[in-house]
Amino acid sequence: MADYSNKLYHQLEQETGIHTGYIRTGSIFLAQTQDRLISLKRINSRLNVIGIPSEIISPKKVAELHPLLNVHDLVGAMHVPEDAVVSSADVALALASAASQNGVQIYDRTSILHVMVRKGQVTGVETDKGQIQCHYFVNCAGQWAYELGLSNEEPVSIPLHACEHFYLLTRPWETPLQSNTPTIVDADGRIYIRNWQGGILSGGFEKNPKPIFTEGKNQLEIQNLQEDWDHFEPLLSSLLRRMPELETMEIMKLVNCPETFTPDMRCIMGESPSVRGYFVLAGMNSAGLSFGGGAGRYLAEWMVHGYPSESVWELDLKRFGALQSSRTFLRHRVMEVMPLLYDLKVPRWDFQTGRQLRTSPLYDRLDAQGARWMEKHGFERPKYFVPPDKDLLALEQSKTFYKPDWFEIVESEVKCCKEAVCVIDMSSFTKFEITSTGDQALEILQYLFSNDLDVPVGHIVHTGMLNEGGGYENDCSIARLSKRSFFMISPTDQQVHCWAWLKKYMPEDSNLILEDVTWKYTALNLIGPRAVDVLSELSYAPMTPDHFPSLFCKEMSVGYANGIRVMSMTHTGEPGFMLYIPIEYALHVYNEVMSVGQKYGIRNAGYYALRSLRIEKFFAFWGQDLNTLTTPLECGRESRVKLDKGMDFIGRDALLQQKQNGVYKRFTMFILDDHDTDLDLWPWWGEPIYRNGQYVGKTTSSAYGYTLERHVCLGFVHNFSEDTGEEQVVTADFINRGEYEIDIAGHRFQAKAKLYPVTSLFTHKRRKDDVELSDLHGK
């Protein structure tokens, strides 16, 4: 987005004749610690492959580029030479002027009272000067977007909150600074510094921000925000350490202006899940100008074509639910978010505020047994379980780009999944029930999903919910509970998005019912060869594959509890069962499972073990590996698509065409060869992939494979023409003939590419009970 903005602002002046103050200064990102330098090296290797020039430079080079900087405490820096500065007010004027020339009408000094909605569709806006009819409305109201969203007849929830943001302006130096002096970002010192009319403009993101306007809007108060020198003092000290000569300069003023932040530091864009035609672009986390051009482009594509040209799920309004809209939550979260913008973010860090909001009934039990928690969509999920003899505090504080302290803990959980039996609480999954009086449920699901759902009662179908382009809107498992009733399991963060997608296509029919039952069921995943023994002992029913085949669902009693939905699948490729337990029985069933499982070596496990297992088995997860631009044919899931099921489904035409023409990217598994797990930097995700020295894609997820005793990365390989750079068809032969390297922070490691999972590099016998796996990859 920033790259597009840069190019757009560069040409604005020629197009409109309005001076925008565009000057190419370049940016220098400083590193005071080795960890910060590693973080910059990771960013640098990604920038280079997307065509943004950047390089890692020495402190000496920093001093040459910006002689006024004190560089004695630096270990290195990243230089991005094509970055630029502009005047924000002039850019806004130029954009407005260009829009007017193209027929856009702009009404200034006009306040919106509310947006008019009829039957879930935008019909117009009510202003203090009358009504305007429209089918589309874009809420770009910045810090007032929250209130404006709630003022509609049908409220739209936009989770953001303002904080005071301070920056300093000085008078020009005696010898004014050159206009092309590089902009400095000193994240370890929490400040940024740029040239301003021959002097400097410097602000930052302090550790103790001041949230503002929690009670609601007051547009007049913005003019009355006070200077607060005591509050700014730590940033000022940091600035004087970095530029000692500032001591003699005259400060013009300390500006205090509100900036808007979101719960996850990413901006918010896209269509509201509840009101058609109501779009949002807000919550820019102090990067509104640098992202504005690119974000505007994506939103325009979204409105015109129905989807943007890139996958922007991480920015989509539908990643949030109503639970992120509590003012108390937002106030506390932005106090954490604002300093985080400049904090060093090592892999797998977690937010600390707004926690323990959605929990499973087993939370306290698991917590007492050493569970360490992560949060997804507000839901607490166990990462791993710390054994009683481990130092808890040290584990929490050891954040690193290298081998983490939880390595051995997760190893023992994985080993237990492979050899005995483990329990993972997976209650956070999104769970929907679709029922009808006649065949309506089956008919609509057959249209919405690519696989054939007309299966015998009790069967489970893995399927994608695709868009017109054949890309994954959702990846889920659906169990047929009865002739007219289906149980659908989706990723945790799909709760709002999936509901909106289903509602969009479901006819208004009182005989067709969609119910969100996420909160009604606790989900326990029993993984491992002994899961079958535990369950048959608890249910007095034979659970062997002859009686309970793979991908089968049956209501059973477990212990004293009745009505447990037992499914023979584990989302990992390992043998085992998922138990969907009515919430009031959760504790009883868990206790029984743990008690009976003791003699089989049962233990708790967390999502890190699950991640290692699924990546080793080459399972793609939605939101990490799959997105709206990935099709089933590109990731080896042809078996989950039934092109000949006798009726049309969304995305079918695109898949037929792709089947005929071939795919332009292919999901591939990489096993790192010359990588030392103990000493080398780890791959986490987003690392560039090189084939025969040429960039071909990036990793989407990675984990250490404890069975393979190697690091495993998953990612998509493209085939860019060396002459034109255009994408060409990727065949299995193209993948198999290449020599691959994965770039981790600028260092390339050799990797072997696989299109099918390797059960083990050391044992060649395939496990007989691996039915679920072969079913998934349709070999």
Image: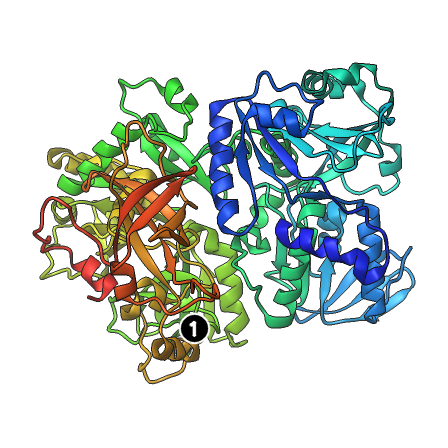
> Disc 1 designates what residue?
448
Picture layout, residue 616 above or below residue 332: below
Badge count = 1
Q: Which amino acid does label 1 sit on?
A: Leu
**Image color mode:** rainbow
Taking the image as shown, residue 779 lies to the left or right of residue 483, namely: left
Q: Which residue is drawn at 18% across and 37% down?
A: 416
Per the image, label 1 sits on a secondary structure element best described as helix
Q: Which residue lies furthest to the bottom in this view?
A: 646
Q: Which residue is drawn at 33% across and 25% down?
A: 405
Residue 173 position within the rendered picture, expressed as x and y whole percent measured from the top left: 84, 24
Residue 20 position within the rendered picture, expressed as x and y whole percent measured from the top left: 82, 50
User: Neighbour class for label 1 at 10 Å: few (<14), some, many (≥20)?
Assistant: many
Residue 723 position within the rendered picture, expressed as x and y whole percent measured from the top left: 45, 65
316 and 98: which one is in front?
98
Taking the image as shown, residue 636 lies to the left or right of residue 234, namely: left
Could you tell me which quadrant the C terminus lies in?
bottom left
Q: Which residue is drawn at 43% across and 38% down?
A: 746
Q: Which residue is drawn at 43% across and 37% down?
A: 745
Is residue 276 visible to us here?
A: no
Taking the image as shown, residue 439 lies to the left or right of residue 175, namely: left
73 and 114: which one is in front?
73
